[in-house]
Amino acid sequence: MRFLSDNTAPACPEICDALVRANTGRVKSYGEDEWTRSLDRVFGDYFGHEVRVFPLVSGTAANALSLATLCPPYGVAFAHQGAHVVRDECGATEFFSHGARLALVPGASGRMTPEALIAALADMPISGHGMQPAALTLTQATELGTAYRPEQIAALTEIAHRHNLKVHMDGARFANAVTFLGCSPADVTWRSGVDVLSFGATKNGAMGAEAVVFFDPTLVRDFDFRRQRGGHLLSKSRYISAQLVAYVETGVWQRNAARANALARKVGAAAGDTLLYPVEANEIFLKLSSARTQALRAAGFEFHEAGNNGEIRLVVSWDQPEEEVDALCRALSPK
Amino acid sequence: MRFLSDNTAPACPEICDALVRANTGRVKSYGEDEWTRSLDRVFGDYFGHEVRVFPLVSGTAANALSLATLCPPYGVAFAHQGAHVVRDECGATEFFSHGARLALVPGASGRMTPEALIAALADMPISGHGMQPAALTLTQATELGTAYRPEQIAALTEIAHRHNLKVHMDGARFANAVTFLGCSPADVTWRSGVDVLSFGATKNGAMGAEAVVFFDPTLVRDFDFRRQRGGHLLSKSRYISAQLVAYVETGVWQRNAARANALARKVGAAAGDTLLYPVEANEIFLKLSSARTQALRAAGFEFHEAGNNGEIRLVVSWDQPEEEVDALCRALSPK
Amino acid sequence: MRFLSDNTAPACPEICDALVRANTGRVKSYGEDEWTRSLDRVFGDYFGHEVRVFPLVSGTAANALSLATLCPPYGVAFAHQGAHVVRDECGATEFFSHGARLALVPGASGRMTPEALIAALADMPISGHGMQPAALTLTQATELGTAYRPEQIAALTEIAHRHNLKVHMDGARFANAVTFLGCSPADVTWRSGVDVLSFGATKNGAMGAEAVVFFDPTLVRDFDFRRQRGGHLLSKSRYISAQLVAYVETGVWQRNAARANALARKVGAAAGDTLLYPVEANEIFLKLSSARTQALRAAGFEFHEAGNNGEIRLVVSWDQPEEEVDALCRALSPK
Amino acid sequence: MRFLSDNTAPACPEICDALVRANTGRVKSYGEDEWTRSLDRVFGDYFGHEVRVFPLVSGTAANALSLATLCPPYGVAFAHQGAHVVRDECGATEFFSHGARLALVPGASGRMTPEALIAALADMPISGHGMQPAALTLTQATELGTAYRPEQIAALTEIAHRHNLKVHMDGARFANAVTFLGCSPADVTWRSGVDVLSFGATKNGAMGAEAVVFFDPTLVRDFDFRRQRGGHLLSKSRYISAQLVAYVETGVWQRNAARANALARKVGAAAGDTLLYPVEANEIFLKLSSARTQALRAAGFEFHEAGNNGEIRLVVSWDQPEEEVDALCRALSPK
């Protein structure tokens, strides 16, 4: 019973159907296909805002290309200290930006606070001799399975914009957050001051599809050159874009997220006081005794440790069998 | 009737079947799946040699990551002046290598000659003040639709190794070349002195799958870190690797290439003396009058110009309808 | 009365004499001159250890080239959060290393503690998906004018080496620290586990001369190529090397540092309880009321603020007139 | 008798005097000194045009920082195939630009022709998939000791500007070229369409001083950040700037160049038909038999080979003793 990550899950039927439908005939490559050409319109409708959309195959590429576009090589991007760009991408942001720096901002439950951001900015003054503050990146849902409320995002982006930073959002689990919040995709993005979004579909039912969404077209700058130079302009773009169109248009983005979230919430409820953070997406973080962790593994549950202090992470996938979740709940319930 | 490129073609049934079969259950991500773990063995059998294989989604990434692994930032890679790495990848090699240089080697029909390589090496001496020769990259089939013979490759790699260069091969159309030559995959790679291969499947029936194949495991070095840093380690690697396994094991690599090659040869034969280079893969280059080029377009044929001198390129895809090829032959035949 | 920085000071007579003596005849360039060729010997004697020495014109270049040689692009260098490489070099380390990261380690009085280093290492585990710990950099004297004791250095380098990190020391004010400690240059470098040193002379009486000193010749790697590529191999190297030779051989390194340290100590003593850190080099940090800071400026003293909390920094140069120091002492003394 | 290079020469008295005069008191660092602050005015007068001037210590840094400012990472700079940036800087341009490419333009006697530039531009079309033409760099005097006439420069810059390229000039031996041409510094720079100049003084009597001169202030962009990040903003900038001011204001730029040029011309005249190119600066290129080359060395003359075909290069320094030149003339004269 695998609760390692939602990226272990297969593609959902709607995505597979879209791929089958796209798999016919000789169509123009490098983004000149009809699916890719429709992305600006499809995502424009989804977000209720003019957008420029670029399909990609990896979230790391989406984040790094976004931040490299917003940050000069001598720029600084402010990120939560536990962010994926900080901990799990092997320096992709530094690579694509040619050496920009990630300044770490602390914050409980995976969220940075306005106070912590202000302090971090104060500690990195704009001056001739230091690196120059350029961007803020927020993760939604956060790495600890929580979700920023729209007003929390707005408070942070307001600070960022006041300091002339542009704002990026890492939305690897964007659908899970939006679904939990019960808001619209617009509410936690452009309406709250987000300039560029890494929109993830891979973890929530796609075979492999991410998008960078620019809410301000002037920020696109040389994204296109950077993408190609990074080997991320795919010749057969149709297969990525067809997934993205289906993901948004069929509503599976919400259906898959809603199911995973609900099951995760169930697990969180069963976990009682071992639960570390509120379950606001599809991840559950627990603090178990070493004995209980071992017992869980012995019972056939697969999961990752989170950090060095005996904390563990369980992730519910969109297609996780209900019986696996029920078994997990039983295993976690206090005897 | 689209003869723009073989990357306009869809995925072939064997690839689609493999994807469907792979699309079940929650499997470990980031290359820990069974398909990715089998790649070294599957390609080891294919090449008759110990190999280390890394799945990727783009040929540009395969080339750039290979050359960046072989070349330090102050290194020089020798490439044919018309090579894809030179002309079509927006400087991906320079990007991934942190500034290595491509030294251009001329040569008729897309192939560099030993003499030209020797001259280029002589012009770029190893010294304290200049960049350091580090790699040779050959394209097989070449950008002009010709194929190096094994002994031609061996002659070039012998020169390269004598100068302490490592040898990379860009095999975006590797299957077309091998099928044309009637040799084994080994004959034009490790047996001829190739150290690292960009193995392409996308253009020849895959949905999107490339592989970097190291014939010398010690050259792998920090490839893995570079790949992740470049956003090219996919979480759902199974979908790339399953394509690669099917491509090699079902024999579609050869079947698709053989069909495309045969149809391209037919077109070449019909083209008469407008044919610029022998058709040794699935590409046909013609020199037509402006009037004939326009007439061809007016008749519904789509193709690219090649350079600035009225030359055109026609590419036959693995699934190109026979009637389209016949129509093209008729249109090209001297009246 | 300028207490802004010791880099405001002129060159001392011994350095000027050396430059005059070196300024004769046509001598080989790019380091083939006699002064540069003698550096390994001269510094070998100075440190009592085999060394490889490279002359440079800027401390930023010395630090960045050192760390780039020790850290791969996906590497992490651990640095005190207030270090010059972190705050004052506009990302030179990130630039020269092609994107390595500086992980910040806290610590009072400008010194990191073993506990803080261990915690930082624990927070940045070696794994396939993250950046890889590669180097530790220590500043001696620190940015707050304190000096690490040899045993403090040894404790930190022992941790570093146990984690397979190499150790760099930023010695922009190396002479001030060694002179304060009353130890030998060896005691705070190779004898305490330092692998590479940025040896500064500019701030302590040179016109412009720094050196990178490798105590382990195998670590030199491709330093030479990186230096040239960075525009830091000077054609007329003799003028840098002659300064370095004179600086070490005439003993001015110690005489200048001793004078500056003694005067700084005097200022520190006069400052009473406004003194923030012990004066162990030639820098004095004070916490003054806004009124007193203004009064000090009004009285003609020039100095920098240090941070945002009303702290100020005063630096005594090797040639600071005694009467300026006396005037400063009077101005700082409690009435 | 050393004719290896003009960078073997010492600093001339006017430069030394300027250094001595600048070596007094504690003056502001990092370019806030009076000499650096006067550079825009001093060079503005020298060129008869508004300029922005940045002092540097190496020609490689001047060239690389200039081109990196003009070229994005995916940009192409067109350079003569024998240019210093191509052959002698270990890829500094690629390093500082984060991977821009040098496209090589051929041309006899070290000069590119308009036809060759046009052909090179035609071969590197602006398109979505390739690197983007961004800059032209010309060397004045050229690497073969010839000088572009103002109208030759104008013809090339006109082509460049028509293609939206910016124009850089590598003026490591700028004074020699201007003095030979008998024109004003303006004639071969802004009046002929040059946007940015690497102005060299080191080879012509300075101790170590170069400058980047922007004739169009809007092109400065982020030069300042790049310079600091490259370790090329010196704390004691006064010592570089004082040299530059003296070099221009005392007229030694012209006096030194005139002397070196005249002596070189004498050598060229003596060389008879072994002379390869007209002597238009202070370099002489000869084609000698192997026996004569050996004889020359045996007679005590030091010089470099130029390429692999028995060609040699002799450079006359500003302070070359007349008797050495006479001896050389005798040795070269046909018996």
Image: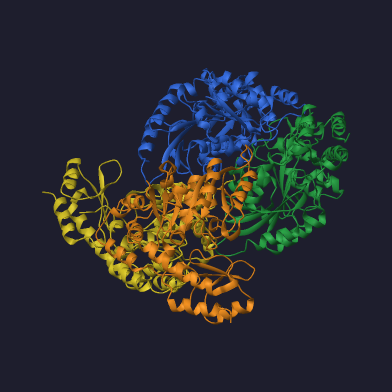
Chain colours: A blue, B green, C yellow, D orange
Q: Is residue C112 visible?
A: no
> Residue D278, relative to residue B228: is it above or below?
below
> Residue A181, relative to residue C111: is it above or below?
above
Q: Percent position (x, y) of residue D195?
A: 46, 46
Q: Quadrant of residue D219?
A: top left
Q: Percent position (x, y) of residue D173?
A: 46, 61
Q: Quadrant of residue C176?
A: bottom left
Name the side, left or right, on which A283 lies relative to D217. right
Q: How many marks?
A: 0
Q: Percent position (x, y) of residue B52?
A: 72, 50
The residue lying at 56 percent from left, 82 percent from top is: D298
Q: Is residue B298 visible?
A: yes
> Residue D295, relative to residue B241: is it above or below?
below
Q: Percent position (x, y) of residue A144?
A: 51, 31
Residue at the extreme left: C335
The N terminus of chain C lies in quadrant: bottom left
Name the side, left or right, on which A267 lies relative to B305. left
Q: Which of the two residues, D117 or C123, is positioned nearer the viewer here?
A: D117
Name the side, left or right, on which C249 lies relative to B83. left
Name the side, left or right, on which C4 lies relative to A104. left
Q: Which of the two residues, C310 or A96, is positioned nearer the viewer here?
A: A96
